[in-house]
Amino acid sequence: MITTIAKALLKMKVVDTATDKKKRDTVLIVIGSICVGLLMLILLPIIVFMSLGSVEPPETDLQFDMAAFISQLSPEQQENISAVEADGQSIADAMTAADLREQTIKAQLIYMSYFNGNRLTDFTAYGEHFSQDDEQLIQSLNADYCIDIDYTEFKRTYTLVMNSTINEYMFTDSSAKNASDLAAWCRNAYESGWGYADNCFGERTGENRIRCADNVGLIMGYVRYDTESKNFTDEIVDMYYTEQGGIDTMPEIQGVGVSNGTDFGVYVGGGEVVFSSAIGGCVQRQAISDGDWTNWCTFDAVTYPQEVTEQETETTTGGE
């Protein structure tokens, strides 16, 4: 979906190529011919995103050799790419230092899309803006940097870009399956516009090639996702959980599960739960009080903080 991302980074004026394989392949053929000038301006952000590992390679039958593409550009164009790559890495470093690593791609996307070559000198100050909710973020960036980001346009762009990849920056510990990262995984699925599809765990599927998960698959997708290969393994096929008690006894720990006896969700903080629903047709987020959740649970494949594991558990372990 290289054209989807490229157009998104150009503020997504047109998105009809997102689901048209013929158009995607045509654009890749143009890329392969090493056209420059305007094409280079269009492709620069996505090339940088791919080189930084922020987004995954496009899904296509054709091969795109980024190194070969860059090698045939002019020295000035290669220098431009190197400068933007350096800025992208500086943003990543600043977001990590500000304990906002999960927001890295958002910060890089806005910078590459809206700053129009006006390079930052203070990445720390820029990164600090991202502690706000998205509406406040856009308002403060517009005011402080004299830019004009339309909030609705930004959300549409960001959702499309994030749906094309698995955000590597959301993981605090990619070596172990843990409660904090499970919550981040579910928040990311909601913010990235994942749909609902039976027997899916986060793969891109259907005519629109969007990421989907069924109810249990949203949780199992995290368990089965390998951060090194960036693929879903099939080693674990069942979800085992331990029911801990009534919803009124649930601790304030992100990553614990909630259940209504049939469906499952994951607590993501702020009194909210994320779950995938066939009724809504997508991954959803709601206040716990707005749902029919009756119990909380832990998932056996996920490690939890000590305050969870020390709680008395009476109950039942089951599989889905």
Image (cartoon, grey):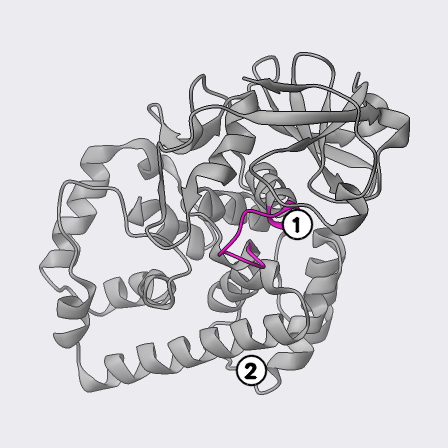
Along the viewing direction, whichever of 201 and 73 lies nearer the viewer? 201
Residue appearing at x 55%, y 38% in the figure = 189
Q: Residues within 10 Å of mark 1 (few under 14, many from 20)?
A: many
Label 2 amino acid? Leu
Quarter of the image where one finds residue 273: top right
Picture layout, residue 305 above or below residue 234: below
> SS class of the residue under badge 1?
helix
Residue appearing at x 71%, y 72% in the figure = 128
Along the viewing direction, whichever of 111 and 284 lies nearer the viewer? 284
Determine if residue 195 is in view.
no
Rendered location of residue 217, percent (x, y): 50, 26
Rendered location of residue 124, percent (x, y): 65, 80
Q: Main secondary structure of the magenta part?
A: loop
Q: Give the side of residue 213 with respect to residue 291, left or right.
A: left
Along the viewing direction, whichever of 178 and 138 lies nearer the viewer? 178
Specify the segment rendered in magenta. 171-181
Magenta span contains residue 179:
yes
Rendered location of residue 313, percent (x, y): 79, 29
Q: Mark 2 vs mark 1: give the one in front.
A: 1
Furthest toward the left, the residue is 33
**Residues at marks 2 and 1 touching, judged by CB atoms closer than 8 Å:** no
Picture layout, residue 219 above or below residue 172: above
Q: How many marks?
A: 2
- Give the residue number, with chain letter if any, for mark 1: 180
Quarter of the image where one finds residue 173: bottom right
Q: Earlier in the sequence, mark 2 or mark 1?
A: 2
Label 1 amino acid? Ser
Give residue 120's mark: 2
> SS class of the residue under badge 2?
loop
